[in-house]
Image (spheres, coloured by chain):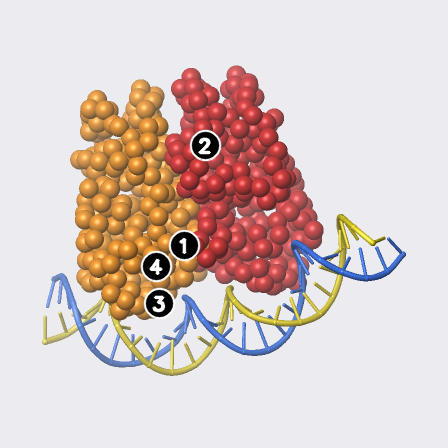
Chain colours: A orange, B red, C yellow, D blue
Amino acid sequence: MTDFLVTKMRRRDAVSAEEAAVLHGIRGTHRRHAAGADLILAGDRPNESTLLLSGFCGRLGLLRDGGRQFTEINVPGDFVDLHSLLLKTMDHGVVALTDCEVVAVPHADLRRLTEAHPHLARLLWLETVIDGAIHRQWLVMMGRQDALGRMAHLVCEMAVRLEAAGVADRLAFELPLTQAVLADVLGLSPVHVNRTLMALRSMGILEWKSGQVTILDWDGLADVAEFDPAYLRLRRDPV
Amino acid sequence: MTDFLVTKMRRRDAVSAEEAAVLHGIRGTHRRHAAGADLILAGDRPNESTLLLSGFCGRLGLLRDGGRQFTEINVPGDFVDLHSLLLKTMDHGVVALTDCEVVAVPHADLRRLTEAHPHLARLLWLETVIDGAIHRQWLVMMGRQDALGRMAHLVCEMAVRLEAAGVADRLAFELPLTQAVLADVLGLSPVHVNRTLMALRSMGILEWKSGQVTILDWDGLADVAEFDPAYLRLRRDPV
DNA sequence: CGGGTTCTTGATCAAATTCAATCGGTGTGG
DNA sequence: CCACACCGATTGAATTTGATCAAGAACCCG
């Protein structure tokens, strides 16, 4: 159940058999959400954190005029709102981008776990800190990269994160996001998203049809994106 | 020395006298940096975290063409790189935007502190999680607000954060950032930063000369910015 | 097969960039 | 005290990027 989480953590630090057992022993409420459903709304005060088991979720901010901006796409093995353990009140919403399967873990249990297992606590802290690193990288894209670079960067990131969780292959994976969602991820209009994808296609870098991404030229893609996976912290480094 | 930090934390949760004493007891290397100096470079593996005592720092990402994008402005009382405690390798640099005074605290000491004082550990974790919330809010600005809204939002945020640290008044404070730096914060060109500031000035909302900000119409500014300080988590909520 | 969503394409428009020049302080050396 | 250099702020003109509006095509799903 928490396999993807442990797989991902083990790219970052050793997780002992005992610690893995503690993580696998996490009990929470198992739920399914249909694509489009709100898992969490801004202003909510959840008393549990949600671990994504399958599907894709997005954290998003809303504007007065109805404008939406995603700040992260979550993949299986991600906690979509581990930070709510400390933030208490959510500053943003979380929506299901596809049908999703999740397990909601009570904050009380997580807190007990962190007090009993300081190393696991640091591994969880690390997960929230990596969320921050992803946000920073997105900020650099949004501020200083053009549409092509942003799109390429997003694809690189999703490829590497899905691979790290052990969910998919780096060069061919399912990413069933509509171009409208991509627009709200990249801060573009849906029309321009379409043109940007066409450009990557015509450059022979990428295929993306019916939610199926195929990367034909990883190096070319990474070059356009100026992608350096260091921020995803997928190297072993004891915490 | 760590007064600003404790002041800020006490806006978020009770900090007992004993805990405050522990924080005040933090010993580290006291340093000064001149404006423009690099405190940390991307790729560094610091074995200490840096608490800012006075002045302003910025976390920034770099691009191939020399483009820069700041991802956060740090004010007195902020750790500029508390996340390095877990990230180990820095994914971004930190530069002094003004002359700065800092104290560098060894990671070993911080780690010992978190193991001995779980509540303080959570307060520190919270600080890193709030960094993430700030990044998210910036992403929404960058993706979906125009230049005017972004500038207004930045000013609102700095006003509230400086006030929360007990460093300055919300309506009149020093923020000695050049328009070139503002451009790299907001993802704009220096020219457009200039025009944007002129617009806010001509709307009677803001004065900003020689690093001195005066907010003439807070409500107008917050309205342009769509500013809601909830993400800064300045309400008491025990962790 | 029909109806809705998603994708695609074209034409026009607005925002912000780039390039370029000027202006105003501030400090320094003669 | 002035000349000079330097940095930051300001302004204008031409250009680019991406947005908006609008319409048609393709694709699913019931």
**Quadrant of residue B112 within the rendered picture:** top left
Quadrant position of the N terminus of chain A in the picture: top left
For residue A141, the mark is 1
For residue B40, the mark is none
Residue type for callout 3: His
Mark 1 on the same chain as mark 3: yes
**Quadrant of residue D10 within the rendered picture:** bottom right
Residue occupying image coordinates x 36% and y 43%: A231
Callout 3–callout 2 Cβ contact below 8 Å:
no
Depth check, front residue: D4 or C30 = C30
Q: In front: mark 1 or mark 2?
A: 2
Callout 1–callout 2 Cβ contact below 8 Å:
no
Residue picked out by circle 2: B46
Name the spot of residue A112 as percent of width and height, x first. 31, 23
Residue occupying image coordinates x 36% and y 32%: A125
Cα–Cα span, label 4 and label 2: 30 Å
Depth check, front residue: A183 or B177 = B177
Cα–Cα span, label 1 and label 2: 25 Å
Residue type for callout 4: Val
Name the spot of residue D20 as percent of width and height, x first. 41, 71
Residue occupying image coordinates x 53% and y 38%: B39
Cα–Cα span, label 3 and label 4: 17 Å
Nearer-N-terminus badge (1/3): 1
Name the spot of residue B86 as percent of width and height, x first. 39, 31
Callout 4–callout 2 Cβ contact below 8 Å:
no
Q: Is residue B197 left or right of residue B71?
A: right
Q: In front: mark 3 or mark 4?
A: 4
For residue A192, the mark is 3
Residue picked out by circle 4: A224
